Image: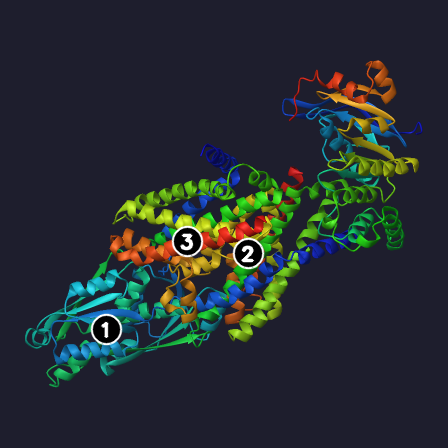
Amino acid sequence: MRTLKLLLRKEFKQIFRNKALLPLIFVVPIVQLLILPLAADYEVKNINISIVDHDHSTCSQQLISKITASGYFQLADYGASFNQAFKQIEKDKSDLILEIPEHFENNLLRENSDKLFIAVNAINGVKAGLGGAYLNQIITSFNNDIRVKWSQQPRFSPIPQIEVTSSNWFNKFMNYRFFMVPGILVVLVTMVCAYMCALNIVKEKEVGTIEQINVTPIKKYQFILAKIIPFWLIGMFIFSVGLFIVARLIFGIMPVGSIFLLYAYLSIYLIALLGLGLLISTFAETQQQAMSIAFFFIMIFMLMSGLFTSIDSMPTWAYYIAKCIPVTYFIEVVRMIILKGSGFTDIKYHFLIMIGFTILLNGLAIWNYKKTS
Amino acid sequence: MKQFLSFVKKEFYHVFRDSKTLLILFGIPIVLIVLFGFAVTNEIKDAKIVICDYAKDIATQNIIQKLEAGNQFKISNNLMSHTDIENAFKAENIKLAIIFPAHFNEDLLHLNKAQVQIIADASDPNTANTLTNYVTVIIMDYQKELIKNKSNPYTISPEIRMLYNPELKGATNFVPGIMALVLLLVCVLMTAVSIVREKETGTMEVLLVSPISPFLVIISKAIPYLFLSLINLAVILLLSVFLLEIPVNGSIWLLIAESALLIICALSLGLLISNITQSQQSAMLISLMGMLVPTLLFTGFMFPIENMPVPLQIISNIFPSKWYYIIVKSIMIKGLGISAIWKETFILFGTTFFLLFVSLKTFNNRLS
Amino acid sequence: MTSEVVIKTDKLTKRFGDFIATNEVAFEVYAGEIFGFLGANGAGKTTAMKMLCGLSKPSSGNATIAGFDIYKQTEEIKKNIGYMSQKFSLYEDLTVIENIHFFGGIYGLSDKQLKAKSDELIEKLGLQSEAKKLVASLPLGWKQKLAFSVAVIHEPKIVFLDEPTGGVDPVTRRQFWDLIYSAADRGITIFVTTHYMDEAEYCNRVSIMVDGVIEALDTPDNLKKQFSASSMDEVFYELAREAKRKSD
């Protein structure tokens, strides 16, 4: 016990004396937590549209006004030819082109129908899809308006209408940041803890101090605990700062569910994570290797854990990989507790899985550690 | 010159003998391509929804069938009462609930008006919006069918053409982004660490007293990574063309030249970082933790830069990967030539010169 | 030097695959002795020493350190030995006092004992003005002396020294050996490897390892007589030049 205390004292001194490291552990994650949610926004807005109007009729003018008034689109260009508009797309000044053909109004009145031509820059598939959909909606609505206006005669029977009302729960203001901030916090804590822990141990290996430890009466489990505990505490600290200061004060996020439950899950999660850091350190001989391996895992975690894109949309094989990542579960739990107020019974399953991860990762790490030293 | 080459040879040995790091270096782009090409997607599929159908008549059945037909939705549960909805949201991963009131069809036929209520889990507002839209569109389709028999005057038919990416593949947007990310990060990270490691172990002094100019010593460190990155680039392009079926529409030589420019830019940045850090740990932390997330963000392929608040948009201009991303999209996807991207190329050149200049200045100071 | 045996090895062997690094080595070391463990690079002495310290498990053979079995009682062995290597001994980013307290505490000294011991140590080495400074700021010679003192702070039965005086001037080396002598006088057995042949002369007995086997073990005087050499340098040269294994 005394040995552990001595070891912990040494570890903390070393961490806090490392002037270069401290800002990177504490400041960088917090700054990223501030900036990331501001930048991360999938909402499709400010779509630039180039309109080529060959008709110049009241009808086309009304359509154009409706489009610009909708709030979805910004008129980037109002030109005379399709080619001119296309150049806008090439230069990324415009996202889509609407071409209104000649005699549009007349054709509608006389022939009862006419076409409109839309070309969309589909490099960003989602933006294109939504942009196209919005434009379609506006055109359909415009179409209905014309019908109502031009067909005053009761020749046409009334149309049955389905009224769709929608309401949004758990995030009334549709604030994307409420969704992103908890998730980003999880990823940042993950990065710092797993990475730092692995690096710290490997540094001792590289420098040779691990050999000195091995000749002393210090037991392996004491050594490992002394490496894990400081980073567990650091992880808790960063999470708390992130949750109570950044999330609450800056983004206005107040957890709906039980904070105690959140921290209980966090504690277990951190142990699992540090087990991973430990495991990585048993495979790496140099700091550079540890860094590369950690980099690899962090990339996968960030992309496959459901932080930016939902895991339900993944193909089955990717879905199962995502289910093998501990981060995925914590992100789900964090969102469930903070936004929906889920209780213990709701996340029972997640708890079990995380405990499983803890045992698995730490067990593997300790087994491998014994083998290689 | 011969001395320079022997330095370069030594550096190649360092890099290629560390098989673990090498594995990761080559593995990362491949994994990223596979992930972004197939796994990570912004589209919505198999979203779990619940339905509370009080009517259970032909209209609701029809609509429900339509919902199940596509692959966007998975109907997880048919609830008996709408009070169960809140629990469903809390307990499982339900994204949306639809409530059909009793007598839905009757109301529609006789009163010409009926209501449907959609409740979305707006934790993820985007998904909520998109799903609500999808459901609304399907319901509107049903409505259109009802009035199909009645004459439809004044129909406007929009014809939509999707440019550059008719299948709306997500990968089209991502692959240029991955190129930017991988080339930038790998070069910066590896160069910085490689140089700092020599400083840390003390072998840097040995190198610097050799008859070769210190500047060339540093350059010799960068060359293996230049080489490695070009190989990575080739791998990414091959995978993209053959696996993801995203062709290179423009000139491949221009693409390679621009990529080389970005690589040199990244190497200069690595050099700069190595000048200001003393330990490998710091170099790694700055390159990895300090740059991974911002690069991911500000390159512009995950989130559109136009959506960001203006100060962040300004910050994004500092990242060479942002300009490179635009260049790659223009060449690879749009098939354009140098005339379209001269501005971005110029900015990359400028950034490279600036970084090289600053690192050389700080390097000389360090020595003395 | 007494006749109590503190290190006894019997056919101690370490194999790495087909390669036999240490080949059935057998010798005894007595309490209070200064025992020089010599050999060319690659001869197998580092491997042998690692086994004796409990850092690596032998492939076969037996040994007892301070009376404890090398296979079954490694924990007891660790409590009774000290270790200092040229590559590292102290934490550079901790102060002199912090290093003393850490290692002393690990070896079971109570807080009171630590206070007394560290005062004594600092005074003996003349480090009063550096006591609160980081070890990194000390010149190499002082680091070595401090490292040795910390290695014996718990008055172990044996202290293992792996090339402890590399890279310092002869005066500092002499001062270091003064510390070794005083420790030996207190009854601590010194097991030291070195490349400095003049240091070999300071030892009570010396063993020379060649190609994994001990080719000679005796007092320096006897060895010089045996090989008709005027210095340990020559003795070493005679034995080591026949070595088939070049340095690793």
Please state the total of marks drawn on the protein image: 3
Label 2 SS: helix
Label 3 SS: helix
Report crowding for label 2: few under 14, some 14 to 19, many 20 or more residues within 10 A (C-alpha): many
Q: Quadrant of the C terminus of chain C?
A: top right
Image check: A241 left or right of C131? left
Which residue is drawn at the image coordinates 67% and 38% (left, top)? Answer: A373
Would residue C16 be visible to someone looking at this image? yes
Residue under label 3: B353
Q: As rendered, which of C217 and C139 lies closer to the eye? A: C139
Q: Amino acid at mark 1?
A: Gln
Establish if B130 lies above or below B205. below
Q: As rendered, which of B11 and A286 lies closer to the eye? A: B11
Same chain letter for marks 3 and 1:
yes
Q: Position of residue A105 (x, y in %)?
A: 10, 76
Label 3–label 2 contact, CB within 8 A: no
Q: Amino acid at mark 3?
A: Phe
Same chain letter for marks 1 and 2:
no
Labelled disc at residue A191: 2
Chain ID of residue with mark 2: A
Q: Quadrant of the N terminus of chain C?
A: top right
